[in-house]
Structure formats: structure tokens, C-alpha cells
Amino acid sequence: MRTKLLILASSIGMLGWGTVLPYQYAYAADTRGWGAFAAALASSLFSVGALVAAPFAGRLSDRFNPVTVAVLAKLLAAAGVASLVWADDASTFLVGMFVFGFGLTASTPAASVLVLRWAGHADRRKVFAYKFTAESIGMAVGAFVAGQLIDLSRVDGMTLAFVAAGVGFALSAGIIRVAGIGAPADEELEVAAGEAEPRVSTVEALRRVFAVPALRWAAVVTVTLALGFYAQFESGLPAYALTVLDAPASAIGLAAAVNCVVIVLLQVVVVRLTAHRPAGALLMVVGGIWTLSWVVLSTAQLVSPGVASALFVTTFGIFAVGETMYAPVLNPLTASLAPKGLVGTTLGTFTAIQTTFSALGPLVAGALLGLGFAGGFLGLHLAISLVATYGAWRLHKVLRARPVVERTGDTVPAPAGAPATDEAVVTAAA
């Protein structure tokens, strides 16, 4: 029941993401007249807020009750996005976006730790998959409904979206709080699992995390796969559609909806088909799908606006196929590789690494598209997707060479001559 409530809370919370992020670029740049740079900076500050929050929240999730961390973070996100209603100048809007990003991302490592604590080992991929599907539904519903209701020709045209987002995050916080009632305390879980150990400094924790070779390659894959799609989902891709393809604003909401529908239709099937497939190999497939998506996007500017809009929407469906493997695989793999007692820190660190580079994504997109270098925008992300595929291949090789695998919660030697299956690997440093 707790995992079901957590999944529900994740879906409701991401309604706020969907109602605001896909449209804030056009709202800030055109509706408010603050210009392309301010709009791109707003997206970057959202990511900077995430960067600041992720490692901080990860450490808090290891030291304190992750339910409390998640609840407080979501309430902060609610306050940040609601403050955009009263943003009368660019600086106030930028501060609100920073707080919004901080609160939203601070809840992420805490929620992941809750999945690991509330779900059995055999069910973790499935729970992460359903959580991701629920979040996609929330984002898509929010984006689609907002696309029909907001009016980017009016200064107050996004007020309803900002208010709805704030209410969604507050309700999400309440659901997580209810789910956490009666859950074992952190100390009880550590003693029961035999994982209690002395606290370590932040520097020592990071040293231990990156002492694991597989985690270093996992970091490369995390960054490049995120840059290959998610870093541009909220600003770069909508800007490309609006400014280069001359697509209507409703096409952005439709693309998000198609992305969601594909995920919902395929997620359960993909989880079943890939349940026993090596995580590294699946991430290689994701990199290949990302590459294909950017190739299709590159052809969109060569055709008429109507066909280009259709290709843009179709591409979001292609991205979604990769997402059905990306989300259920990466977090459980990262957590399984984490040093003992540092799961939250590891997840938070990876989120911070991802957002460090993602913060540059909107600025790069704004600069390239603003200067008319659409080809450079497309070529850069095609190259990033190819690097992601290579990184996943190296990760796959490292994991297969590891000497131990995790089976039914126990660490046992791999059979002689048999490579380890990488989605079940645990770190020898644990």
C-alpha cells in the first residue's frame, strides 16, 4: 500500500511540472517580454536549484527519515511555483524558478530511497517503472490540459497553471506523509538489515561513491542520456518546435501527451520483457533510440510546417520507447552499486551531476536557436546520444567483469566462467 501511495503522490506532483515547464520559455520570452536570454536563464536556474538540492537532499535522506525530507521538499516546490503568480519582473520570476527546481529535485532522492525501503528487491524495477509511468501521466496530463487552457498572449495567461502546480505539490506532500505513517524508523531499518555504520563526511562519502568503477561509467551514462532528451524537454525542444518548425503551441502539449500514452501502453510489457536483461545492454538500446529520435528531428525542418509538427510529435513517441527502459533500470542499478549506508547520497550525487550539465542545456539551446544555428543544436544532441551509447557499452563491460552478483538479497560468488548479470550487481566496497 505504501508504494501505491508513493506512486500516486509522484503522479499528482508531476502535474505541476507539466503545467509549467513546457510553456515557461515562451511565457517569459514573449508574453512577459523579458527576452530569450531571460527565458533560457529561468530554465537554467531551475536546473541550478536542482543541482544545489540533490546532494543536500541525498545526504539528508541517509541521515534522517526520507518521508520528512520528501514532504518538506514538495512543500517548498509548491511555494516556489505558486510564487510565480506574483512575479512582476524577470528577477522575481528567476528566483521563483530556482526555488521551484530546488524543491522538486530535493524530493527525488528521498522518494527513490522510499522505493528501495518499501519494495522488495524483486519488485524494485517494477515499482520504479510504475512510479515513472505515473509521473509521465502526471506530466502529460498537466501539459496537455495547460496547452488547451493557458493563453500566452496575456500576462495572466498562466496564473491557473501556477496555482494548479502549487496545489498538486502540496497534495503530493500530504499523500507521502500519510504513506509514511507507521513505517519503520531509519534506525530500525539499518539494524534489521545489518547496515548501521558510523557517519562519514561528505568528502569521504563522495570518495567512496566514485571509487567504484561501475559508478563512474554509470555517471557518464546518466549525464549523457539526460542531456540527450530530458535537458531539452522543457525548453530546447519546445523552442525548436516554435521557432524553427513553426509548430503551434498546442503541438507541444500533444507531443507530451503522445509521450505519455506510449509509456503507459508499453511500460508493463517492456518491464516484463526486460526483467532479466542486463541493465548495461538496455541502456545501450536507450542510447540508440535517443540517436534515432534526433535523426528524425533533423528531417523535420526540411518539410512543411504541418508535416514538421507531426514529426515533432512522433519523435516524442520514439523518445518514450527508450524511457520505458531508462527509468526502471537506472535508479535500481545505481542504488545496487552504492556503498553501504550511502544509497541516498549516491542517488543525490548522481542527480547533482546530471543537473550540473543539464543546467547548461537550456542556455546552449537558447544561444544556438537564438542565433539561428538549428543544425548545431541538432548535431550536438545527436553526438551526445552517441556518447551515451558508448558509455552504456563500457558500463556493460565493467559490470559483466564484476566477481559478485546479488541473488535473493545475498551476495554470492558468480559461477566459474559465467559473467555477472549487471542489473543485480552489488559493489564490493559495500
Image: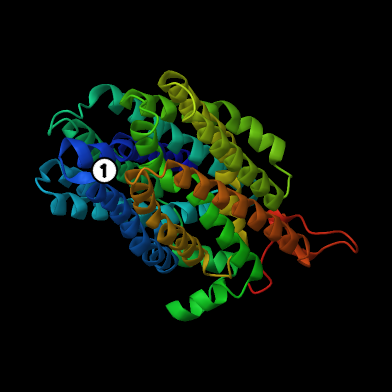
Q: Where is residue 404 in the image (x, y as percent from the top left)?
A: 76, 65
Residue 236 visible, this orientation: yes
Q: Residue at x 28, y 28 (%)?
A: 146
Q: Is residue 80 left or right of residue 399?
A: left
Amino acid type at circle 1 is Ala
Q: Residue 244, image x and y in percent?
A: 38, 33
Residue at image location 40% in from the left, 37% down from the top: 11
Query: Foreground residue, 117 or 392?
Result: 392
Is residue 200 or residue 319 the one in the foreground? Answer: 319
Where is mark 1, residue-wise? 170
Residue 62 position in % (x across, y down)? 45, 66
Q: In the rendered image, which quarter is residue 417 located in?
A: bottom right
266 relative to 189, above or below: above
> What is the quadrant of the C terminus in the image?
bottom right
Disc 1 crowd rating (10 Å Cα; few below 14, some 14-19, many 20+) is many
Colouring method of the image: rainbow
Tag count in the figure?
A: 1
Camera sees residue 320: no
In the image, 23 versus 237, the foreground residue is 237
